[in-house]
Amino acid sequence: MTLASIVFQTSPTPAPVPGSNIFSSPILLSVLLWVPVVVAVAIAVMPNPRGRYDLLMKQIAFFTNLGVVAVMFIAYNQFENFLPTAQYEEKLAWLPSIGVTYHLGVDGPGIVMLLMSGLVGIAAVLASLGVRERVRAYFCLLLLTESAVNGAIVARDMFVLILFWAAAAVPIALLILGWGGPRRNVAAWNLVGFWGVGTAALGIGTLALYGATGGQSFDMDTLLKVNAVTPRIQIAVSLVMIVAAATRLPLFPLHGWVRDVLGEAPVGVAVIVAGASGRLGAFLLLRTVIAAMPAAGHILSPLLAALAALTVAFAGLSALRTADIRHAGAYLSMVPGGITVLGFAAASPLGIAGSVLSLFTGGLAAALIVGVSATLAERAQSRSLFVLSGLAPRMPNVAWLLTIAAFALLGVPILASYSAQVMTFFGAFKTQPIGAFAVAAGLAITAIALAVLLRRVLFGAPNSQAPGVSDASLGETWYLGLLAGALLWVGLFPGGPKIPGTDFPLFDPGLMNQMAAGVSDMTAPYVQPTPTP
Amino acid sequence: MPFILLVPLVSFLLAVSSIRTRRSASAMAMLGTVVTLLLTLLVAWGLTRKSSYAATYRYFDMSVAFQGPTNFQTFGIQLILQVDHLTIAALGVIELCIIAALGWHQVLGRSEPGAARFHAVVTLLLFSSVGVLMSGDLAELFGFWAIAGAMTYLLLEHRWGVDVAATRARVALALPFLTDLSFLCGIAWLYARYGTQTLSALIPILHTNPGWTVRSLVVGSVLLFIGVAGRLALWPFSSWLTQTSTTAPPAAVAIVQSVWSVLAIVVLYRLMPILGASSPQALQMLAVACGVAAVAGALLSMLGNEPRRAVSLAGSGAAAILAAVVIDVYRGPAVFAVAGVAAMLAIAPARAGAFVAISTIASAMRTNDLAEMGDALRRMRASSIALLVSTVVVGLGSASAVAYGISTRSRVGLLLGEAMLLVAIAGLRVFLGAATGPLRRRRAFEPDRVREAPREAVGYPYWLAVGGVAFLVASFVAAWLNFLDGKQHPAPSLAAFGVWLAVPVIGFAACTFAFVRSKDGALAASAVGGAYLARVTAFLQAQFDRFVVSPATDIARRVDNWIPEGDSALGRFITTAGQLALVAARGPAIAFVVVVAVALAVVFALLAPGVAR
């Protein structure tokens, strides 16, 4: 069997979506994972005398991401949303003596995360087109970052997950150290410190599960089998996993890296950290605590609700009092994470389903607010909110995108985050009404913070002492528009556009349909019985 | 029918994508509104043959569980568009108010900045208003409600270059957002208990769904009521309207007042089966709350001499009376709940007309103080008459609803009667202050230069007032109520009409008597009251800032500083560890291991003397 025949195979089962059956492959996920790594290595070894091929390297990185996103989209289209099990599985024995396998696969939430990661990745590349120094190293590290994040999403073996989870921190820290702002050292060490703690927690939790399940295998099908361990161990492991997730998402009080990292990192790095890398924390919670340890999920739901409420409230208050627009964007990017965790705290099928959707919408919204804040600061040549004022007439594109970002954070209808927040709140009100009220109050504070920010930066009286400003460039408009457009698209067509007069999907099967695969099985332990009259 | 919803949306998209000049923006907005009105009339003609239209579009459906109660196994939001007589009447009133306000703004709003933005926002507000009125799904309704709320904020903070306008507009965002969140919480609360948010499916199962309790219905009802009360601007939720009444463009405030009066009362009417199913005590409490809001709104209107604020609060008082009627009738057979809606269809254009008229007068007289106004009846006759007719409609408007639905012998009736009296006084006070008495010369102001508004603009407040009169007369006719809700309504006795009409008339008479005796004395008393109110408000605001806002932001600041201090320690630790590692790597390995082992042994011995022994 040649490589070509392995890579390009028709799918064994016909898919119902027009345009499906384009191709499938038994190594599709590995292709998505390792092609960016191969390209990164190729870029690293390419000769580039005096930066002659900088533009070529940017183009290579861009088209690599474009190809990866195209393959992701095809995988998303051909995904069978009626199957609860993982799809596109690949399994090879790696370290059989300790039970480690190279096991990859995606289910409904996984395909949603993968698609979001792809969109954020290509946005990060577009946002980085303005990099002028050490272009080769920059894009090499950026591609490695994307690969590590994608690996953490598709990993079905906890050992492999830990490797990718930890691996994501290294290139990000190097990117910040090499291309960050004046406080890049502080930011990089903050990142390493907090994410190191999270990785250690993840490792401890994994080893505890490994020991409790007989020490045979690190495979998620074994370690994360529903109720595989006693409730006491579930609670202990869940607490550790919450620490790991809280350092990555982030959640209050383990959010200390957010302001410095997202404030000092280059724009593309900030976008990918806030968007895709941050959502890994919530994804970990979903996989380990919610899906696999429902007893602990029920008991710890008040803790999760409290963390969610504190995160949203703190983010709103901090954004309200900060005087730096990038810091404001960094704090505001914490809000979607809080809402996602509220859905987990709801411990109800609707709440969990809403959280799965908010993995996608929250990632895009967080990436958008961070990206537009950073772009605005660059274009206005100032980060201080005492200097930035009345910019809307001179920066109409940025003004629109900042407004859309604000609406996305608040869950305004027409944008995808509306559906996610409605489902989350509706699901949370039955089981965690106090937490839901508290998060709603935090959202009110966030709304005030956003109103103050928009009024001051965009709609206030122009500041004659401010430096000259220019609107977003074409590349910047494209990457921000891509994120906003994705939110708008899913907001308008959550079930996918249909051929008029039929229920036949047009070219998008619908994010809500695809993400449903496996969600019903995850939520089965959380179904409340019918009340007796 | 969906075109009624799509036309304003298309108008908005055209406005934001291609239109830049004032005239073209105004023309596009007017065209969109007029076309929507024509479509409304077309549907109204179609409704002569059918009682209602309905169309359902699936937004999304998702299966979330395979077990458990059937209602909770799937979740979906449907776009349910329903049109009946009430919807058409409400839509017609909203469209007429917007057309009049836009027409007035075309002439007298020329100096306002951002014409393209203003008109685009108005068309999107119209789109969302249509959506609210036609929605049959609560989540869908909230979606349109939230869009309308966002557009309201953008209208009220329109003068973004002026700091005081932008600062005051923050209240217009924060306060309604809180009440809208309460509305969302109410919908979520009901969904959590019943598993559906479609009104037609929810109402029949309110008392039959397993696990329902009176407590859950009461909590949901209160949350929904707070959401509606916020948008009706009932006291104490009225500050978002009063704070922006002088800082926002007058046409914007007029549109917002009239549109939300209609939207909120119709939504309250449609939600009343849910509120009515809770408990009679809860209904009484809500009705009394509305009555108190009406009295408070009217009293606050009489404190202070800012005419636009006074008109807004008087209208808010009238709206509160009607909300009380709609709620209180549900303690009984609930036949006359639609009377409250019918009366609001009269008051809404009157509120807009009164606001626009007094804005015209205030602009011509270059003052926002009633004490400095006067003689408008002679100098600006058309605007004054429009103001008079509008304020009379606001004062009389609630009489029909109260006559239909409230007993003269009940406590709620007593409370509402008092409120009607005060609303009548508060409304007419504005006219008497502006239109009667001398117009005195002030510094840099010559009274003889006060002229009526341009002919192109003077008719709009007048026609709004006439529209209010027409709907007011209709609200007294039982056939109009029959048309609105498709049920038969017996006409109340003439004595009831007489009693409830007499109350505002007495209020008008009392106010007229006070102003005839001493206009300056009446206004001076209001000024003193207003100054005292301002002092109390400032004191309360300062206490709120001191005990709530500042501590909260201070806590956030301290936590935010605490974390980097910890980070610094962590960073120093990491740096030190790294440096030690480098030293260890360079030094002799065996010696280093021996040193570390000895050090660990000493530490272990110190900490565990029992083991060392």
Image: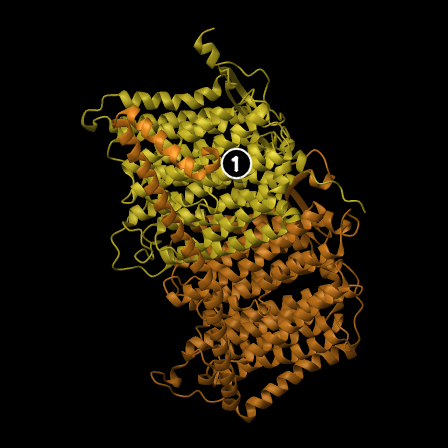
Q: Which residue is mark 1?
A: A241
The quadrant in which residue B600 appears is top left
Outermost top residue: A1
Three-letter amino acid code at the position of disc 1:
Met
Residue at position x 26%, y 25% in the image? B588
Q: Is residue B320 left or right of residue B552?
A: right
Instruction: Note whether residue B597 is visible.
Output: yes
Q: Nearer the viewer, residue B568 or A479?
A: B568
Q: Is residue B296 left or right of residue B47?
A: left
Q: Is residue A115 left or right of residue A386?
A: right
The quadrant in which residue B391 appears is bottom right
Residue at position x 58%, y 15% in the image? A12
Question: Chain A: what color?
Answer: yellow
Q: How many marks?
A: 1
Give the chain coloured orange: B
When the figure is inspected, residue B139 is found, relative to residue B168, above or below; the finding is above
Q: Position of residue B294 (x, y in %)?
A: 63, 73
